[in-house]
Image (spheres, rainbow, N blue to C red):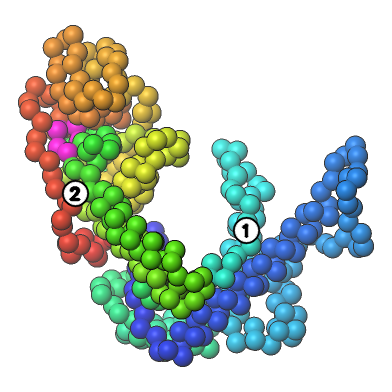
Amino acid sequence: MLLTYQFKLNPAPEQVVILETWGEMLRRHWNYALGERLDWLRRTRSQIDRCSLVSEPIGEIPSKPDYYTQARNLKQTKELFPDYKNIYADCQQQNLMRLDKAWKRWLIPDKKGKRGGKPRFKKRGDISSFTFPRVNSPKAGAHLIGNILKLSKIGEIEVILHRPIPDGFEIKQATILAKADGWYCSFSLEDKTIPDALSINKITTATGIDVGLEKFLTTANGESIEVPQYYRKAQSKLARQQRRLARKVKESKNFQKQANSVARTHLHVARQRKEFHYHVSHWLVNSYDLIVFENLNIRGLARTRLAKSILDVAWGAFLQIMQVVAVKRGKLTLGVDPKGTSINCSSCGERVEKTLAIRVHSCSCGLVIDRDWNSALNILKRGSVGLPTPGCGGLDSSQPMKQQVSFVNLRCSRYTACS
């Protein structure tokens, strides 16, 4: 299993200039290579039974460009533009690999028949990362020795190792990237110590989780977590900063400085949210062997009038983090169909229609519990069909709902090494 550890770099001013120059030159090369592919596509795409009345390509139609042909042309690029000789060759090849993957995602559908978006030309500053595919090997362009990262054609850069790299982990590649508050390095580590997944007959505790906007999630044994609303709380500060930005002259130094302040605020909100997701994920994985969740259509929900609140809680990012943490701990997760989980009664199965404004589930069988708790119980029942789940919490819904578990004000210290 590959893990990513990200550390902040402390480059010298002249090294910052080199890093920024590499990003700009790789951006131009991306645009040129993408232009080649789009030009070939335009010249070779025509309808079978008619020709265009507007324009037709003239001249010799070039051969189909792909990663291998464009990688072979790197030698010619360096002859025409000698500045590209100053960029490590593997970084240029990785840049073309990224384009090739984006191109194939656009043209070739996946197993479900879905395709990615059309690759776009990059504006200045859009490419702020590049990858060294080999680290600490004889022909590698990156070597990590202690807290010093030695990069080919750039030099030695201090790495702020806020957590040690575990023994036995092999560093596969290093990606240098720029954020609003400085430069970072992401190391891809191969972890060979991942435990085997827990066998079904060894499940001792299980729960279902229902995510929502009033409460971030509710478990099947009645525990709930409040919604932190990090973006909502930062809105007033962001509004002030964006008003100041609107008054600046575009592309001026004051404009760039204020734009960086806005970006730093967004980055802080994103980090708060991610830290919260990791805290909740580790709490769930430590408490249960099996976690059942809903396979929600989050993209569809994000098109409703509740879009801002849904994107603020970031259910998709949380569920992805939770599944990764579960794999690292050898625990199990299972997604189920969300249809009817909030309408059906968890006790007798009868449908009890209710709007979003009704927060209490009241059934004719006598069951009266919180709406989200009822959904969590239904989710657990769907995911545990045919599974031995002794010790499943929340099956006794006659008890009052437990107190909320608060993760909002915690500092990320306990689980940092596992994130």
Q: Is residue 256 left or right of residue 114?
A: left
Residue at label 2? 283
Q: In which quarter of the view is residue 13 placed?
A: bottom left
- Is residue 220 located in the magenta-colored stretch of the structure? yes
- Is residue 360 located in the magenta-colored stretch of the structure? no
Residue 337 in the image, given as x and y percentages of width and height: 38, 28
Of tags 1 and 2, the one toward the viewer is: 1
Q: Is residue 316 left or right of residue 54?
A: left
Query: Disc 2 marks which amino acid?
Result: Trp
Residue at label 1? 120
Residue 306 in sight here:
yes
From the image, which quarter does the C terminus lie in?
A: bottom left
Q: In which quarter of the view is residue 345 placed?
A: top left
Magenta extent: 219-224
The residue furthest front is 247
Residue drawn 39% across and 85% down?
Answer: 11
The answer to which of 101 and 356 lies nearer the viewer is 356
The answer to which of 183 and 365 lies nearer the viewer is 183
Residue 190 in the image, given as x and y percentages of width and height: 39, 65
Residue drawn 30% across and 21% down?
Answer: 355
Q: Is residue 256 above or below residue 401?
A: below
Dot 1 and dot 2 residues touching (CB under 8 Å): no
Query: Disc 1 marks which amino acid?
Result: Arg
Residue 12 tag number: none
Residue drawn 15% across and 57% down?
Answer: 410
Q: In which quarter of the view is residue 206 placed?
A: top left
Residue drawn 60% across and 44% down?
Answer: 115
- SS for dot 1: loop
Q: Is residue 173 left or right of residue 145?
A: right
